[in-house]
Image (cartoon, grey):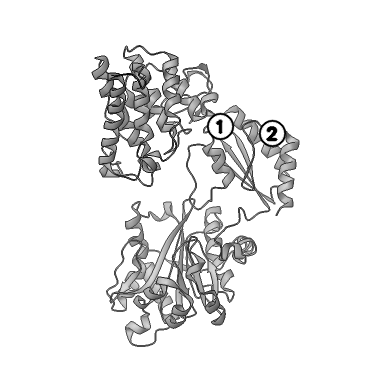
Amino acid sequence: MWRLLDVSLSDPKLNVAIDEALLIGRHCGFCGETLRLWTSEHSIFLSRIASINNVDVEACKKFNVSIIRRLSGSIIYSDPETLNFSLVLNDKNFRIPVNPLKAYEFLYSFIQRALNRLGFDANVEYAKPLLINGKIVSMAMQHYYYDNLLFHGAIFVNTNMSIAREVVKNELSETLTTFTTLSCEMGRDMSVDYVKNLLASSFEETFGVKLTVGEISEKEKEVLDALYKRKYVTDKWNIKGEAPLTLKDALVEIYIAYPPTPLCHSLLSLINEVTADLRERLEIRVWYRGMGSTPGVDITPGLKHASKSSIIPAVIINGELKFGPEIPSKNALRDAIEKAFEHT
Amino acid sequence: MIKIQQKAICTYCGKDELSDYICKNGHYVCQECRLSKPLELVIKTCLVSKEKDPTALATKIMLHPAIPSHGPEHHYLVSAVLVTVAKNSGIDASEKTLQEAVERSRRVPLGACGLRGDCGAAVGAGAALSALTKANWLSDVERSLAMNTVGATLNELAKLGGPRCCKASVYIALKVGVESLEKFFNVKIPFSKPKCAFYSRNPECWRERCPFFVEPKI
């Protein structure tokens, strides 16, 4: 069942954090597939890797524009007249084309259909913004977390491009001349609510699904709360792009062989025993050598070290290689984990 | 993977022991090899291998998770594989020859191809030829053979362009190395055309531009 989430919060940081909470929630099985349509107070959204140097921080203060980093995308200005869309789904359930070019076209097709209904000839090209009359009217990007996808972007309905031009710097400011809004292209005012309804019906027609209006679940709210406190309100994330290692109090990573050897099994048993009373506060990740990385999950420096130096089995605590290849004693492991809590 | 306890032989080191897991094709990798560092793995695999086809031996080693997609492990892997297939094809080579060839090529650092123009896999082939022919800086044809092997490998790799692919470099170095061995020692060494099993792990894969790329069947 597809959920339509029409949730926009007044705090732009909390608003953006919802997308990640939905993605994690989908991975944890808290919810099904979701289409979220939302607006934000005046904000500039940076991608994970975008430099803060492309943003005029003083101008943001002057125009009361929040700077928020999100999981993917380029640099997008958003205001209450910009309609954001976020699609959260499991790629196995939705049969997204394997070819990333085709996947992008496939996911963007409901936006394209909606704009075509307005009489535009909208073109979609891989990793490029959506154009009408040769000008950018929508941008979107994909981000994977395990096998779950967040496809999110924006449609500039009646966006205040003059503020957008003030708050971005360098060549980005120049590229904004190639941006347009639906209202501008239509020659009349378009309402965000009208476009919202248009997108929802276009979505149902394009993908042959029925959307049911829903709410954020309690479990998703718990994730949202952790994301907000540990990530989205921090300058470390919003300005530097550094994500917290975990949403819990500490992270323990175990690097073992695949399939696990008896030695690896001993380490896993030891970890289970030592952390039995700490599960609420501790995130445990098990990595198997040669099985590749997991989309959307960061490789910590300690894991990289263990992998590059073939230190296996290994225990990495809060991103730092602590033990390996010898199995630590119960006490040494417990002490190291407790020390990790002290640093959070 | 199938969890099963039965007598099994390690695919890499040849150890005969009770398995804990075997793969669906019946292969077993012992605990020691599953935890091996790349250098240990390459040496112990080559020391017990009876393989004559360098493609088969190199591919088997590169499929082990200790060998990353790219990295200096590929440099000495070429040396070890060439010495092994030479020995298995009747060319005189001892454990010391293998160790010597590996020792010489493992000094080539990561990224040498782009940073100074001498791909470590090419140097690995040269080191194997030098070790097998007992060449040094005073030698005549043996020295030329090693240099020609490195040069010919580099030429082929340069024609393929970039960015670097250590798997392709290994296969090219082995192909050129085998040609040199056959010419010098007058032996026949089977070289089966590689069909790359690693493209999905390499985001910079050359795909259709690579002589070893095989279009995956979807």
Q: Residue A332 vs residue B110: left or right?
A: right
The percent position of residue A230, horizontal first and vertical second, equals 64, 61
Counting residues from the start of the chain, the first of labels 1 and 2 encountered is 1
Do the CB atoms of the residues marked 1 and 2 lie less than 8 Å apart? no
Residue visible at 57% across and 47% down in the picture: A300
Name which residue lies at 73% across and 41% down: A334
Q: Look at the picture and state if A254 lies above or below A297.
A: above
Q: Would you identify the image quadrant in which residue A112 lies?
A: bottom left
Q: Which residue is mark 2?
A: A328
Query: The disc numbered 1 marks a residue on which chain?
Result: A
Q: Is residue B122 above or below residue A62?
A: above
Answer yes or no: is residue A5 visible.
Answer: no
Q: Is residue B193 left or right of residue A258?
A: left
Please, what secondary structure does the residue beneath circle 1 have? loop
* Residue A92 in the image, given as x and y percentages of width and height: 42, 51
Q: Nearer the viewer, residue A147 or A219?
A: A147
Look at the image and tell me whether residue B136 can be seen: yes
- Where residue A98 sits in the image (x, y, percent)? 35, 51
The disc label shown at residue A292, or none: none
Q: Which quadrant holds the C terminus of chain A?
A: bottom right
Q: Between marks 1 and 2, how big is the CA–CA gap?
A: 17 Å
Look at label 1 and name its amino acid: Pro
Q: Residue at x 47, y 69 (%)?
A: A54
Residue where numbered disc 1 is placed? A260
Q: Amino acid at mark 2?
A: Pro
Left-right relation of A290 to B89: right
Between residues A300 and A222, which one lies in front from this camera angle?
A: A300
Q: Tag 2: Cα neighbours inside 10 Å, few (<14), some, or many (≥20)?
A: some
